[in-house]
Image: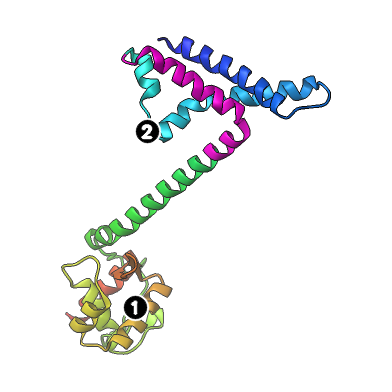
Amino acid sequence: MSELNIFIIMIVAGILGGVVNYGLTRPEKMNYQGLFWSTVTGISAALLVPLFLNTISSSLLTSILDGSAKASDVYVFFGFCLLGAIASKSMIQTLTDKILKTAEEAKSKVEDLEKNVSPILFKETEPENDEEEAPEVLTSTGDTVRAFGLVGDDSPKVIKAIGNSKYSRRTIKGISKEAGVTTEKTLETLEWLQKNGLGFTTGTPKHYWSLTLDGRNVFSRIIKAES
């Protein structure tokens, strides 16, 4: 069956469904304007049936178009269009909500993927070596990240535990053990790093910690100052 025939089926079903939908309202007096808009809505809903079939992973329309469908499948498709036209308002709203939900879920998955991949990208990115452009984050005497306001011996240990690891994402327990810093102090430092854009977490409900690109720059400067 050609695409033109499918289009005609949808239009006819939309008109018929729109008239039926108008009739179900049982108007006391004939309102041609109301009938017109009911018909337009019915046609619109019928034209959305292919999209609806796609969302439920139905191959009905595809089989009709490529000729592999049974003769009765054409009537089934017409029935879908007619039913959609009769319940046009509900169908349009339901389909709209479903499409928006699907798009939101897809967006969320992409964001999660980017967030989970970013630790690897940051680890593989060469640190900033331009002294004029990069902020001075260490004193000449060693392990003090003064430019960012973080001082003490424990903080650089935590940063090094993340930066030196073969893992792109690390647990608090693993960081604490390698850094030789208490879990409480490790968590405090990690939260500070996240607050200041030097670290971030991925994965739920168990959180994994990584350094941002700026955090990697701080790590490289700690190593440079020590050497």
Picture quarter containing residue 212? bottom left
Was residue 73 drawn as part of the magenta stretch in this picture? yes
Callout 2: SS = loop
x and y percent of residue 38 in the render?
69, 25
Callout 1: SS = helix
Residue on which disc 1 sits: 190
Residue on which disc 2 sits: 57
Left or right: where 41 falls relative to 101: right
Magenta span main SS: helix
Q: Nearer the viewer, mark 2 or mark 1?
A: 2
Mark 1 surroundings: few (<14), some (14-19) or many (≥20) residues within 10 A: many
The amino acid type of the residue labelled 2 equals: Ser
Was residue 144 drawn as part of the magenta stretch in this picture? no
The amino acid type of the residue labelled 1 equals: Leu
x and y percent of residue 103 in the render?
45, 44
Out of 169 and 136, give the one closest to the viewer: 169
**Part of the protein shown in magenta:** 68-95
Q: Is residue 196 above or below residue 155?
A: above
Q: Quadrant of the C terminus?
A: bottom left
Q: Is residue 181 above or below residue 56?
A: below
Picture quarter containing residue 118? bottom left
Label 2, label 1: how far apart the Cα atoms are: 45 Å
Out of 214 and 73, give the one closest to the viewer: 73
Q: Is residue 186 above or below residue 199?
A: below
x and y percent of residue 116 in the render?
30, 59
